[in-house]
Image (spheres, rainbow, N blue to C red):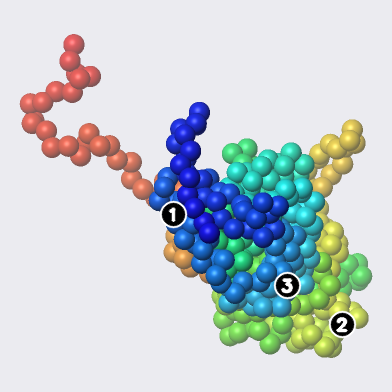
Amino acid sequence: MSDIRKRTGARGTTYQVRYPNKSSNSGYAYATFNTRKEAIEFRDGSRAFQNSSCRCDIVSVEDGVQKWLDICEKEGRNGREPVTRYTLDNYEYRAGIIKKYTWEKDLSGLSKADIIEFRSWLLSNYSRDVAHKVLTSFHSMVLELVSRAVMTHDVAAGVTVSAASRYDEPVSIPTEREIASLLSAADRLANSKNAVLAKTWLRYRPMLYLAIDSGMRPQEYLVAAKGCLRPTGIEVARALEGGGTRITVTKTRAGRRLIDLTSETLQMVRHYADKHAVANGYDLIFPCNNGEWQSIRNWRRRGFGRACEEAGLMEMIEEDGKRFERPKYKLYDLRHFYASMLIDQRVNLKRIQTLMGHRNIQTTLNVYGHLIERAEAVSQERTSVLMSLSRDSCGKSVAEQS
């Protein structure tokens, strides 16, 4: 039987709920709340939990994590499709970190304070980014178990690690002049007198044009299908898994989208697919000579890196006391350039989200919000609040007074 006890101490008045817990030595577990209302809601939920036909084999945090992984792999969370193998590998890595922590309580005994302690442990032992991802997965597990009546309430609510830092640098975006130089470099390389170089850039040139003109992710255009070319553009329907081991569907449903291309790019891509691409079993537009898909690493080094060098887009950096040159931009910066052009053209924010393949608009705002604000600031007329006020013609401002 559950009961509520009022406690008054140095921290003021709190309400402690005692409820049955078979895994506890005393046969009871305890939860403390600041208000009686919260305590009553927990008590009533605890009663429902005790009377429900829950999974009694899910007791420890380790049990809960494994249940969550099984759901992600076989069923899909919250009605969604099961995750890809690559995503599951990431989840398993995070689950391993959760299991490393010394959990002194079972699932039913966890409180918000316990999750805060877990967060402190994460931040002490891992990077902020890893801590954010692990805590997000932990919260996802809790919500899944609450929905299945394995846990009574969301003990992780409000306990977060911000993924962004105020010291984070904004995305790096090539200028229009630099992009023009990059495309000109691709044109020169494709028309090189060196036969080997020209043959290589016969494929790399349309790839670079497509990357810039579509804003597609590298893992999307490397496995783009000939069957996805449309009269005015290309449909994004699949992608390489993070490890590059196999072709799968786009990471989320939002990733599937239709992107318009300039006629020059579309014609160039279609010409390569029809006239030069080797026969392959994957319907690839840009297959390797053996019919397999290209690796992002090779494309980054031999293709994009070479084009940056030809265009003079290199920078000198120093690491471990050694100075060396590297491309000024990364592959993803072409995607950022595409987004910046959409913003400059005042494309609707929802449309930008769709074209970028973002699952939610918050991602678009997080990455490109500063560009949107800048574009809006340029387009707006400067206004003054006082200028809009209706005043007597004989009125004088404070500055006019002697």
10 Å neighbourhood of mark 3: few (<14), some, or many (≥20)? some
Secondary structure of the residue carrying numbered label 2: loop
- Distance in Å between CA atoms under marks 2 and 3: 35 Å
Mark 2 vs mark 3: give the one in front. 3
Q: Amino acid at mark 1?
A: Ile
- Which quadrant holds the C terminus? top left
Seen at 66% across and 42% down, the residue is: 117
Q: Which mark is residue 70?
A: 3
- Find residue 282 and report its image quarter: bottom right
Residue position for label 1: 40
Secondary structure of the residue carrying numbered label 1: helix
Q: In x, y percent, where is residue 300?
A: 81, 60
Q: Which mark is residue 291?
A: 2
Q: Amino acid at mark 3?
A: Asp
- Find residue 41 and report its image quarter: bottom left
- Distance in Å between CA atoms under marks 3 and 1: 33 Å
Residue 396 appears anywhere in the view: yes
